[in-house]
Image (tube, rainbow, N blue to C red):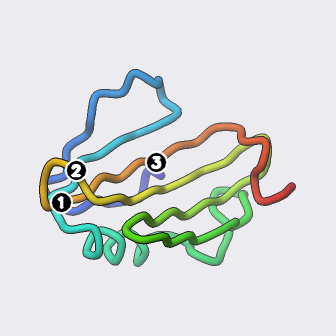
């Protein structure tokens, strides 16, 4: 999601998974990170030609998904286990259970 702007001070993690996933350490707490990203995401609408699938919230884990079986995008926010900040993961790949399609 090239237009997505993470909070100031966010740093990318090394990625051994190629270009399919980006992982970021974000200095803001989980709730603030969710609010910051949700304001930028097309929640409830399509993205890059992909239909919106779900906004899932469980405890301190938030996920947004768009896609089909052939092309599926997820944005996941979770609390950091090491700091008071949070972690953001952005992934794009085929997914057999995408939106039930």
Crowding at mark 1 (Cα within 10 Å: few <14, some 14-19, many 20+): some
Q: CA distance from mark 3 to mark 2?
A: 18 Å
Residue, x 29% and y 46% (percent of image)? 24
Q: Left of 52 or right of it: where is 19? A: left
99 and 19: which one is in front? 99
Residue, x 34% and y 77% (percent of image)? 35
- The quarter of the picture where residue 55 lies is bottom right
Instruction: Judge whether 18 appears above or below 64 on screen.
Output: above
- The quarter of the picture where residue 46 lies is bottom right
Badge 2 element:
loop
Task: Give the mark toward the camera: 2 or 1.
Answer: 2
Crowding at mark 3 (Cα within 10 Å: few <14, some 14-19, many 20+): some
Residue 36 x, y percent position in the rendering: 31, 73
Residue 68 x, y percent position in the rendering: 78, 51
Return the mark for residue 85.
1
Asked if disc 3 and disc 1 are in contact, CB closer than 8 Å, the reply is no
Instruction: Judge whether 93 appears above or below 77 on screen.
Output: above
Task: Give the mark toward the camera: 3 or 2.
Answer: 2
5 and 68: which one is in front? 68
Q: Left of 13 or right of it: where is 27? A: left
63 and 93: which one is in front? 63
Return the mark for residue 90.
3
Q: Residue furthest front?
A: 59
Q: Left of 49 or right of it: where is 56? A: left
Residue 85 x, y percent position in the rendering: 18, 59
In this figure, which residue is indicated by the disc labeled 2?
81
Instruction: Judge whether 96 appears above or below 87 on screen.
Output: above
Of the image marks 3 and 1, the number of the one nearer the N terminus: 1
Badge 3 element:
strand
Of the image marks 3 and 2, the number of the one nearer the N terminus: 2
Residue, x 71% and y 44% (percent of image)? 71
């Amino acid at each position: 999601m090239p237009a997505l702007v993470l909070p100031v001070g966010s740093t990318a993690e090394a990625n051994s998974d190629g270009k399919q996933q980006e992982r970021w350490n974000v200095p803001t707490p989980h709730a603030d990170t969710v609010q910051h990203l949700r304001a930028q995401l097309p929640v409830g609408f399509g993205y890059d030609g992909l239909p919106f699938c779900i906004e899932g919230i469980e405890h301190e884990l938030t996920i947004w998904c768009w896609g089909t079986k052939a092309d599926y995008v997820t944005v996941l926010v979770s609390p950091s286990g090491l700091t008071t900040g949070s972690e953001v993961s952005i992934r794009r790949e085929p997914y057999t259970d995408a939106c039930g399609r």
